[in-house]
Amino acid sequence: MTIERQDRRSLPMADHVRGKRSPVTCMLKCANACLGPECNRTDNPTFRSVVDAVLTRRAALGLGLAGAVAIALPSAFGVGPGRPAAAAASTTLPFQPIPPVPASVDALTVPDGYAWHPVIRWGDPVLPGAPAFDPEAQTPEAQALQFGYNNDYLDVLADPSGLTGVLVVNHEYSNEGIMFPPSLGAVERSRITKMAQGMSVVEIERDAIGAPWRATVGRRSRRITVETPFALVGPAAGGALLRTVDDPSGRMVRGTLGNCAGGTTPWGTVLSGEENFNGYFTTPTATAATSRYGLSASPSSTRWELEDPRFRAADGHEQEANRFGYIVEIDPQDPTSTPVKHTALGRFKHEGANVRIGEDRRVVAYMGDDERGDYLYKFVSKHRYNDGTGPGARRQNLQLLSEGDLFVARFSGTSPAAEVDGSGALPADGAFDGTGQWIPLTLGGRSMVPGMSVEEVLVHTRLAADLVRPTKMDRPEDVEPHPTTGRVYVALTNNSQRGSRHPLDEANPRTGNRDGHVVELTELQGASGTAFAWSILLLCGDPASPSTYFAGYPKELVSPISCPDNVAFDAAGNLWISTDGQPGTLGLDDGLFKVSLEGPTRGRVEQFLAVPVDAETCGPVIHDREGSVFVAVQHPGEDGSWEVQRSAFPDYGATGPGTFAGPRPSVVQVVRA
Ligand code: FEO
Ligand code: CA
Ligand code: CA
């Protein structure tokens, strides 16, 4: 179905898009998740009630809050503002922050002294034989060989020589209204968009270390689409919940959907989160599970269900949607390898996953479920990381995510409920902070959720988590451990229902949370343990607003920032945040921001770049030692139409055969000029 311009303008989303995205993005990307019935209608306790219970117990024992806090906050809090820095704050990427860019500007804006170029654009060749991009004559066969649409996660994996490598990219969704001429038929569009989503592995090369990367076609080049076979692995693979008429084994799925963020593992594979998979299905029969995942009988925005019965979830395909919503793992070095879907990491609207090696050598993956009021998760592997360099070690490491324990987070705060008033004003103890627990959903191969089998926990993970009373969060996006301090950064992008459907709590303290926040989490028993401490690092927004907080750094010295989404780190230990939603909240183009974490500049937010009109900034990769930053520019000119395009990114002003008046989502490299 084409979403014609007129239809787009009448989309009933005034509330939905308040402070967030364009209605078109909401429909195409998230299947209007915010408009439908609330996915999480459970009545979990806020951690306020948990704290109150603790205080009541302590009062009965004759102890006060101070005692409780002293017990709850051990010395792991010793790394923080004003304390010795764990990483040097210097960087080889010096820049003067750019001024905020108004939301109508169609330009990629970088600091003085920097230049940018697209490494690869939608429609550029990935595989041998790919025809040159021709916007007037697109075909599914061409698109299957070309770079896909709406790039999100990316990583740049250089080979030992430093002169070659692979670029790995997610393609989250597509936008027929601006991709195709109106003359192209609905079936052909559908066949093309199926090839435009998924992932790309792109060979890259450069003339010298530090020189700009360019895309080429090589041995490792690969497109992964909605038709690529994936192996289901882990405890739920082969189970009854994953079988369909096409796959009675329950072990082989065609394709991956809604690939949003991701992470590169210590063993060199790439993880990708299947996020808004529900939007691809029409599901005639409603159950507790389908409702909890936002699956509905409504037509999908892709309309693939019209010609592909598995998206109709009927006639033997009832369980097809159970086969999406996982963390997928691909080996970008081996184009013949079969990518896998990891059931051990649970099924939800996975933003992404980021893996660290714990002190006990088990690997830990942090994950967010990106929905209003949904949860923060982590996975701890059963087996230990093998740091050998041979093929045997790699084979072992490729199994690490197939077996282990899955946890969900419950946060507790330190301040009285009355001091968390929804305004963002700090409580009397000067911080939104506290401790938390990782509550097991599976442990040692057994279900820890009464009444649910391991298979049920891993396929209906949201239903399982609801039963152990985790903390409802403000849309967990990227969750990433810092490479040297080990602290974990959680981007919570926004939640219009906070303070109404989802009660305020100290970890989600602002009513209507329009601008989102960032939580800093410290594991108290090592990465694989079950206790953590936390505090809010940033309450995002216009620094002129009293509702904001930047770790105590002077507000007049920070860039405005709203709707944090993806996070990354540079070699100097700074946090980088990309945003998705600033046009709707601050009236500004989205951007990429550097945040100091240590010493007197902790909390200083500096804007590095701004993306073009309607776009979101994705997949930041910071190679500061090489003077280089990569971003994926997703959905530029989203609100346009074929006839009236709103963005000409990135080929502004280009003419000649194959040029396109509209936008081409692209991976961009920014270099010191
Ligand atoms: Fe695809 Fe949660 O962003
Ligand atoms: Ca507090
Ligand atoms: Ca995202």
Image (spheres, helix red, strand yellow):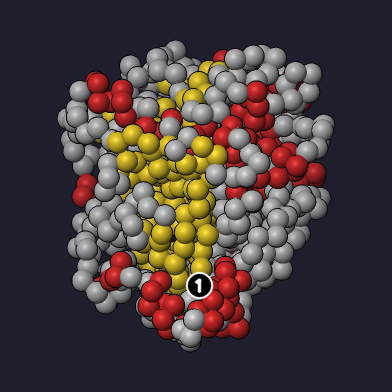
Look at 46% across and 63% down and name the residue there: 436
Asked if 30 appears above or below 17 in the picture, the reply is: above
Amino acid type at mark 1: Gly
Q: Quadrant of the N terminus?
A: top right
Residue nearer the viewer, 238 or 150 = 238
Q: Would residue 586 be seen by someone viewing this image from the given angle? A: no
Q: Is residue 570 left or right of residue 152?
A: left
Q: Would residue 369 be seen by someone viewing this image from the given angle? A: yes
Q: Residues within 10 Å of mark 1 (few under 14, many from 20)?
A: many
Would you say the beta carbon of the disc 1 residue lies within 8 angstroms of ligand 2? yes
Callout 1: helix, strand or loop?
Answer: strand
Q: Which residue position holds label 1?
A: 413
Question: Which residue appears farthest toward the front when viewing the image?
Answer: 61
Q: Is residue 110 left or right of residue 616?
A: left
Residue nearer the viewer, 132 or 55 = 55
Look at 23% across and 57% down and name the residue there: 572
Q: Position of residue 608 (x, y in %)?
A: 37, 59
Q: Position of residue 456 (x, y in %)?
A: 62, 35
Asked if 318 appears above or below 668 in the picture, the reply is: above
